[in-house]
Image (cartoon, rainbow, N blue to C red):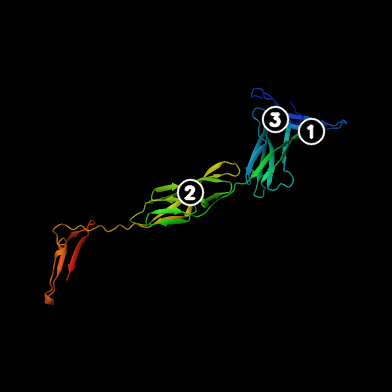
Amino acid sequence: MLRPDGELIANNITAATPIGRGYVVVRATDASGNFTDSTVYFDISPNLSSTQATLGVGQSHTFNFAIMPNITSASVAMPNNVMGVSGQAYLAGNEVVITLNTNSSAAVGELKPLVSLITADGKVYPLELTVTLKVDAPTTYAEPLLSVNQDTNTVSINNMGDLVKDLDGVKDVTVYLEANGVRIGNSEGIYANVLTSTSADVAYTISADFLKKNGVTGQYEPGTHTFTTKAVLDKEVPADPALVVPAGSAFANLGNMTVSDYSGAFANVINIGGVIDPLGRSIVYSAT
């Protein structure tokens, strides 16, 4: 069925009953009987190939179309003033293969390359493609601005919203601190009770996992980034344990001792030992 608006329709097309491929001649006639013929190539089959594509600047795309047996060559032409896009077309069996290549000078937007299918007697059947060129914006990163509270072992990232950005879109950003097999992460940027060490400072690597939108496909893709800045937690200095004074020792009675110097006639020497602290250190008190 050919509608008045030029749309060609085929009903009940199945794998068992495909109509096939070919062309129709559409004649437009005015009131005076003048007419113009236009040849329209068609492919009506269960698995119709798409004539549309979206690709990124700098990418390539290949179209494959089944053709009529009498097609002997093919070519592709770009619209006027289109820069940075080239195309090639060749026959492979019962198909025409069209490859479009773009480079960095191609402009974002829609273009319509024209494919010519040519018979041995010179008849040309046009096939118009629709290509949309897009750019995938780069993902940018900002180094974390940190506040580290050494007393509470808390790390705060003050610029969480600036760490990962993408003009096409970014979401689900999780930032991790990682050191010595320990990995903690959240999306708020506040990390409390971060593990430290009594033997050395601990430098935590900071990284981010996220989903970024591909500006060409429109799909979100996983991404990851490790920052240069590290969160450093100072070495913990253990508190000196309280002394343990054994009952009955000289230290236990030290507070009750009174010594007279006999008006300086001779020196009084006091040496008291026998106390061991919880770390195994011997404590000796000596006075003269």
- Marks 3 and 1 sit apart, C-alpha to C-alpha, by 17 Å
Cβ–Cβ under 8 Å for marks 3 and 1: no
| Residue 134 image offset from top left, x and y in percent | 63, 45
| Residue 238 image offset from top left, x and y in percent | 30, 57
- Of discs 3 and 2, which sits in the foreground? 2
Cβ–Cβ under 8 Å for marks 3 and 2: no
249 relative to 98 in the view: left or right: left
Indicate the amino acid at tag 1.
Ser
Q: Which residue is mark 2?
A: 208
Q: Which mark is residue 43?
A: 3
- The quarter of the picture where residue 277 lies is bottom left
Q: Nearer the viewer, residue 70 or 21?
A: 21
Mark 3, secondary structure of its residue: strand
Indicate the amino acid at tag 3.
Asp
Residue visible at 54% across and 46% down? 170
Specify which label sits upstream in the sequence, 3 or 2.
3
Q: Is 49 located above or below residue 156 in the figure?
A: above
114 relative to 148 in the view: left or right: right
Q: Farthest residue in the right direction?
A: 32
| Residue 37 image offset from top left, x and y in percent | 81, 32
Residue visible at 42% across and 48% down? 184
Crowding at label 3, few (<14), some or many (≥20) Cα neighbours within 10 Å? some
Mark 1, secondary structure of its residue: strand
Crowding at label 1, few (<14), some or many (≥20) Cα neighbours within 10 Å? few
Q: Which residue is mark 1?
A: 38
Cβ–Cβ under 8 Å for marks 1 and 2: no
- Marks 3 and 2 sit apart, C-alpha to C-alpha, by 49 Å
